[in-house]
Image (cartoon, helix red, strand yellow):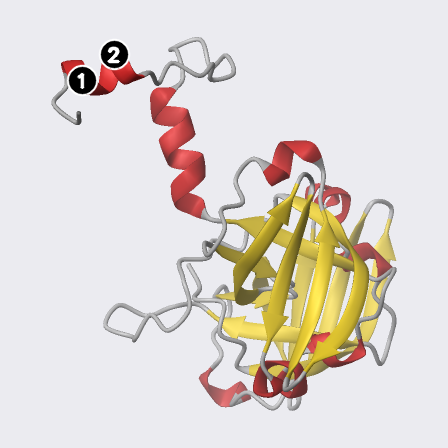
């Protein structure tokens, strides 16, 4: 589990492919001596397992499933990546609960400045947009951000200078693809309200139902 607060903007040393899988090697300013084999580190929001540790960074295996769900397969040597170590019990939860399990790849549609903020508009697949809530949380390339507005399959973010400077967002432009993880709570609520068969939830909320249970 992660918080979406990026600890370091490292860069890719190499990506060694083997069929549909690969080994990703990352250089980081994180204290390498504290990293343990087998621990989880989010790389651009995707939870990866550390398989080797070097003097300047770590290696992690990337499975075919991760390649198919994320932008990691498009990384190149030298490219910056957002890094966050797993949340420890007792840590401050400054962002929101992020699992590191990417829902979809979104695309930045536009980028412009509004006074001290950078405003991004991002488009996501319809199956992903259902979990976006205005003023709710979303992780973009592992960064915990607040949804400002939603328009169909597009949503808008207003990002402060510190976040831009300390993450890969400083190099993202219109047309860039980004990893999207929607808020965990919405997915659990939907699942709990689904029929046992796992069929898609159909709207059942009505004034009569609210009145019956004392909400009106």
Circle 1 residue? 211
Residue 27 spot, x, y in % from top left:
70, 83
Instruction: Give the SS element for disc 2.
Output: helix
Q: Is residue 4 above or below residue 195?
A: below
Density class for disc 2 (Cα within 10 Å; few <14, some 14-19, many ≥20) is few
Q: Nearer the viewer, residue 60 or 84?
A: 84
Question: Above or below — where is 47 with respect to 69?
Answer: below
Point out residue 114 in the picture as x, y percentages from the top left corner: 68, 78
Residue 70 in view (yes/no): no
Label 2 with label 1: CB-CB less than 8 Å? yes
Q: Give residue 203's quadrant in the image.
A: top left
Q: Residues within 10 Å of mark 1 (few under 14, many from 20)?
A: few
Q: Quadrant of the C terminus?
A: top left
Q: Give the quadrant of the N terminus.
A: bottom left
Q: Secondary structure at mark 1?
A: helix
State the mark number for residue 208.
2
In the rendered image, which quarter is residue 78 located in?
bottom right
Is 174 on the left-hand or right-hand side of 183?
right
Q: Which residue ends up furthest to the left in the rendered image?
A: 214
Q: Does residue 199 appear to the left or right of 60 in the view shown? A: left
């Amino acid at each position: 589990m992660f918080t979406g607060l990026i600890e370091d903007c490292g860069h890719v040393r190499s990506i060694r492919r083997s069929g549909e899988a690969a080994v990703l090697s990352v250089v980081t300013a994180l204290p390498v001596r504290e990293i343990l084999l087998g621990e989880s580190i989010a790389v651009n929001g995707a939870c990866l397992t550390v398989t080797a540790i070097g003097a300047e960074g770590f290696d992690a295996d990337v499975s075919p499933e991760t390649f198919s769900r994320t932008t990691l397969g498009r990384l190149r040597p030298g490219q910056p990546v957002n890094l966050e170590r797993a949340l420890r019990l007792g840590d401050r939860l400054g962002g929101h609960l992020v699992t590191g399990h990417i829902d979809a790849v979104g695309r930045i549609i536009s980028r412009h400045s509004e006074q001290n903020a950078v405003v991004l508009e991002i488009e996501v697949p319809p199956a992903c947009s259902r979990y976006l809530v205005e003023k709710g949380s979303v992780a973009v390339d592992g960064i915990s951000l607040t949804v400002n507005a939603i328009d169909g399959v597009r949503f808008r973010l207003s990002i402060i200078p510190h976040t831009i400077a300390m993450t890969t967002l400083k190099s993202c432009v219109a047309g860039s693809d980004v990893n999207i993880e929607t808020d965990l709570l919405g997915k659990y609520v939907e699942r709990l309200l689904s029929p046992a068969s796992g069929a898609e939830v159909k709207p059942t909320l009505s004034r009569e139902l609210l009145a019956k249970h004392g909400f009106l």
